[in-house]
Image (cartoon, rainbow, N blue to C red):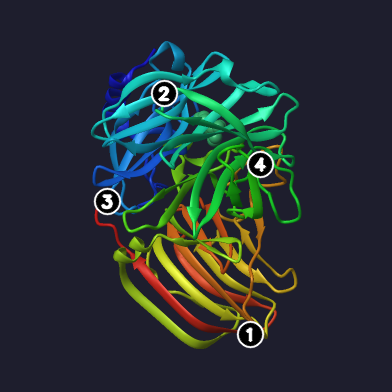
């Protein structure tokens, strides 16, 4: 059984071997090895803490540890020592995903302790946010209600409400319907089952990684149901992440839904978590990758990153996302255009591979309009609005590398996304980071990893089937110092 010291020493001794050609400058990446879900995302002890599912010893998933980043501004992330290792009899096969809260000036994390085929929930506590003491199992297999799987029971979302503690846990029925279960506790140590919060009939397996928060008085649930069946342009990925807005009844567990949607229509987004900033914003981060695909950076000694944190707001029942505002502190060179005709394509200045671009087009006189990014002689990635399809398209089929897709998705190269135009105007807000592109549209987001060659740096605005008008373009170089 490997412990914390083993993990920290291994990282220290091997980190230098990692090839950083595709590592983002402002997207949290593990120092070495494999990373999946964000865990325990919180502001505590004067800074943000982001833990994560971590297998330091290889670039494929293995016995899960909790890695740890910290940040003062949600943009630049520092590595902290590994927080949890699978070193107890009850979690010897993995410390799976979970969440945290501050209580009595201490940071409590609740995570899934895996032992053989059983998944139970365990608690650990820290007085400094860095060193944790494990307090043992707090929800055992016997507490799982009848008719629910005893094997798939994971990813507790811990929260406090009215002086009581609650947790939502990912599960499935014994018949295979994905669901979330609610438990409650007076003291974090003894828990009682309350009821079923949600069942997802479109998923064939588990509702993974629940999250829960309140926005403008509305309760919001996030979860990642596995193998969601594709429905038009919804759920094109192997697995999806959705939000439900409504009201959670803490007495019965039932969540009454008033609106819902998919969180990200791109390729790489899963297992989202939120936290509240000291100034009251709800900020979400997610794993920027997808299960069951081939991984381009595994030969580089590391695998997967997190998204840029996003600020959430609710408008007419739709959960809106925007890049965390702190990113603006890293803007350097600025290029601007206003009210300019666009025929064919327009070459943008070379601002390198970390850029922010906010562009509004008038699409009245054309068919397709958008951007080409990370282009070279042979490679390009396209993000554009297609008037005929009335949707946005993210096409990474010519990015330079090929990613093999999973069984529950048609491909890993092309995604169609929702985009509401206001009149004939389409706005795209892109954040580029070496091998990452997150695009924010009026009421949707698409996220994708882009593996191009080092010299594929050109970016263009382009149109097809007519003339577009560039109403406004703001392009910023983003600068992060040496890191
Ligand atoms: C989601 C997930 C969680 C689990 C973790 C294991 O990506 O499958 O349900 O806790 O990953 O690493």
Q: Please tell me whether mark 3 or mark 2 is closer to you in this view.
A: 2
Disc assigned to residue 72: 3
* Label 3 – label 1 distance at C-alpha: 45 Å
- Of labels 3 and 1, the one closer to you: 3
Q: Determine which residue is flagged by label 2.
A: 189
Residue 238: which disc? 4
Q: CA distance from mark 3 to mark 2?
A: 31 Å
Residue at position x 29%, y 65% from top?
329
Q: Does residue 283 lie above or below 304 as drawn?
A: below
Q: Residue 130: image x %, image y %?
A: 27, 33
Nearer the camera: disc 1 or disc 2: 2
- Give x and y (percent) for residue 57: 40, 25
**Is tag 1's residue or tag 2's residue first in the polypeptide sequence?**
2
Using the numbered discs, state the Cα–Cα distance from disc 4 to disc 1 in whole angstroms. 37 Å
The residue singled out by tag 1 in the image is 467
Determine crowd level at label 3: few under 14, some 14-19, many 20+ residues with C-alpha closer than 10 A.
few
Left or right of 304 in this view: 418: right
Label located before the other in sequence (4 or 1)? 4
Q: In this rendering, which labeled residue sits more in front, label 2 or label 4?
A: 2
Q: In what element is the residue under mark 3?
A: loop
């Amino acid at each position: 059984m490997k412990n914390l010291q083993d993990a920290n020493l291994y990282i220290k001794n091997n980190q230098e071997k990692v090839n950083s050609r595709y590592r983002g400058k402002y997207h949290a990446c593990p120092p070495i090895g494999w990373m999946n879900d964000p865990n325990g995302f919180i502001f505590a002890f004067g800074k943000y803490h982001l833990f994560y599912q971590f297998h330091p010893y290889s670039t494929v998933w293995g016995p899960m540890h909790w890695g740890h980043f910290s940040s003062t501004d949600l943009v630049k992330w520092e590595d902290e020592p590994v927080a949890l290792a699978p070193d107890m009899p009850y979690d010897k096969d993995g410390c799976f995903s979970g969440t945290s809260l501050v209580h009595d000036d201490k940071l409590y994390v609740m995570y899934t302790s895996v032992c053989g085929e059983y998944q139970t929930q365990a608690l650990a506590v820290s007085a400094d946010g860095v060193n944790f003491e494990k307090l043992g199992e707090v929800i055992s297999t016997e507490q799982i209600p009848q008719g629910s799987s005893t094997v798939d029971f994971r990813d507790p979302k811990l929260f406090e409400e009215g002086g009581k503690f609650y947790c939502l846990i990912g599960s499935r029925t014994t018949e295979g319907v994905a669901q979330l279960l609610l438990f409650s506790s007076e003291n974090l140590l003894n828990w009682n089952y309350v009821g079923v919060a949600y069942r997802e009939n479109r998923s064939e397996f588990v509702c993974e990684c629940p999250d829960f928060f309140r926005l403008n008085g509305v309760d919001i649930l996030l979860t990642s149901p596995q193998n969601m069946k594709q429905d038009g342009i919804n759920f094109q990925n192997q697995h999806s992440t959705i939000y439900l807005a409504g009201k959670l009844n803490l007495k019965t567990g039932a969540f009454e839904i008033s609106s819902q949607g998919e969180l990200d229509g791109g390729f790489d987004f899963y297992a989202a978590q939120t936290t509240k900033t000291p100034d009251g914003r709800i900020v979400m981060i997610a794993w920027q990758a997808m299960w069951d695909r081939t991984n381009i950076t595994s030969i580089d000694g590391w695998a997967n990153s997190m998204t840029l944190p996003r600020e959430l707001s609710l408008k007419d029942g739709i959960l809106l996302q925007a890049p965390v505002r702190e990113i603006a502190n890293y803007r350097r060179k600025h290029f601007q255009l206003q009210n300019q005709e666009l025929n064919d394509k327009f070459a943008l200045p070379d601002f390198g591979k970390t850029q922010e671009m906010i562009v509004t087009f008038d699409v009245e006189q054309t068919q397709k309009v958008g951007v080409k990014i990370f282009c070279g002689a042979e490679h390009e990635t396209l993000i554009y609005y297609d008037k005929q399809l009335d949707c946005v398209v993210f096409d990474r089929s010519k990015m330079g590398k090929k990613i093999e897709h999973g069984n529950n998705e048609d491909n890993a190269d092309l995604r169609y996304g929702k985009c509401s135009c206001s009149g004939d105007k389409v706005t795209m807000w892109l954040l580029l980071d070496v091998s990452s592109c997150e695009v924010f549209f009026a009421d949707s987001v698409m996220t994708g990893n882009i593996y191009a060659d080092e010299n594929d740096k050109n970016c263009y605005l382009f149109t097809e089937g007519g003339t577009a008008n560039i109403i406004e373009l703001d392009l910023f170089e983003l600068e992060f110092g040496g890191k």
